Amino acid sequence: MKKFQLLLVLTLCFLLNVNAQHQHLPQDYLSKDFHKERREALRNLMPKNSVAVFFANPVRNRANDVNFHYHQDPNFYYLTGSNEPHSLVLIFKENQTVNGNVFNEVLFVQERNETAELWDGKRLGIKGAQDDLGFRVAYNGKDFKSFNLDFSKFNKVLFEAFNNDVRNSNNTADLFDLIKTFKSKISYSLLNAETVKSDDNFYSSKKSNLNLLPYYMATLREIKTKEELKLLRKAVDISAVGQIEVMKAMHPKMSELEVQGIHEFVYKKYGAEYEGYPSIVGAGGNGCILHYIENNKTEIEDGKLVLMDLGAEYHGYTADVTRTIPTNGKFSKEQKAIYDLVFKAQTEAIKACKEGAHFGKLTIVSQKIINKGLAELGIISNEKEYHTYFPHGASHHIGLDVHDTSNYGKLKENMVITVEPGIYIPKGSDCDEKWWDIAVRIEDDILITKNGPENLSARAPRTSEAIEKMMLQPSVLDGFLLPQLD
């Protein structure tokens, strides 16, 4: 009886400890059933007698013995739910029998290691891969070398091109060795010698057709499920709140880094783990640099515009929202003219976001309106004139990547895309100086529905009038003063 009571106490203590560990963790991650269903969806697209091979992202070194915060390969996460490095997954079209096990998918993971976990945190291990991720068959990475599977029997071995950016460590089951073993198993050096590299950076041959894999993954990922849309909505909403808080806090002499910091603080406050891409805060002429990420201007001058292109990443899914605002809260005559022109182009492009419309139509609609408007303002001589004031496309997909994978054909229900026309007139441009250093981009995240487009980021003011009105509102940061430092 005493032994039974002791066992009961220990069991209760264990359960209470597990419950305490999970009590304050997010509960809205994608479910293991989601990832399992995605693997099945891929399997349905794969040709007969084929296997698809996906590797985890490499660990990136920051400097010396410090690595960047690890970020999983989006395809690998989409199919497995794993956020650990040094792993690979095999997905088979048909059932396979290896060492008496019958399965159609197998995951290789990092081996549990007390010393390593002391420094870097708990690993899933085989049991975690089975219990937490839902893989019936899982092995330690070191077992891949002896895994008795003849890849030569498959008609197709699908895998992505190797970028040769993986470091080799002392761990004999790291990503470097997993890739090395895989290459050996498929005679990659011979395969590579017999093939020609295609435009999309994937190889194809009689035994391996890698061109199929990005097409399959784009076909799946460009259409969002209900679970994905819930996370995307959260990421977009967080990003819109960030834009609003900066509008209220903005004042001349604020630095670009301060603006970035307010956005990213809002992200963290809501539990967004990362930024979906390097934050862009371009004041004045810096806004004319499309991917300006230095954000090191120490004082933003009175009367300048600030272009803010930022997006929260929430549980893997990233938003992409851009607003352009006047430092002092009031657009000048020229700034308003350019802003309202971009807004007009964006509004018409959003209206065109309907099922069946071709993706490229959004850029064409935006270009036509912007060219006509620039000619009417006298910035270009006529709307047919070539110029570089709108040098990019008006849209891209978002999801697990900020530029999410897609086949870029016709728009379909539950796609989520950006609409982001812009005008950028750098100093020295061939127009009146009064237009110089004006840069405007307005970007919203649009869900394609059967009933037309839904603007997921509409919470953040879009019109010039609404922005000016929001910038009159008090900010919770108005009294946030820090001591001066030498």
Image (cartoon, rainbow, N blue to C red):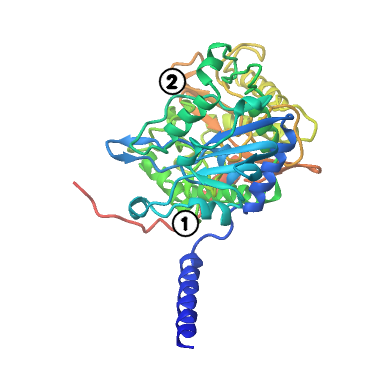
Residue 311 seen in render: yes
Q: Position of residue 246 (x, y in %)?
A: 47, 48
User: Few, some or many C-alpha atoms within 10 Å of disc 1 (few <14, some 14-19, many ≥20)?
Assistant: few
Query: Three-letter amino acid code at disc 2?
Result: Lys
Q: Secondary structure at mark 1?
A: helix
Q: CA distance from mark 1 to mark 2?
A: 38 Å
Q: Mark on residue 91?
A: none
Residue 408 shown left or right of residue 422 in the figure = right
The picture quadrant where one finds residue 371 is top right
Q: Residue at (38%, 45%) from the top-left corner?
A: 258
Tell me, for residue 269, which label it has, or none. 1
Q: Secondary structure at mark 2?
A: loop
Q: Is residue 415 visible?
A: no
The one of 56 and 349 positioned closer to us in this rendering:
56
Which image quarter: residue 396? top right
Q: Residue at x 63, y 42 (%)?
A: 105
Amino acid under disc 1: Lys
**Of residues 195 and 370, the one drawn nearer to the viewer in this rendering:** 195
Q: Is residue 322 left or right of residue 251?
A: right
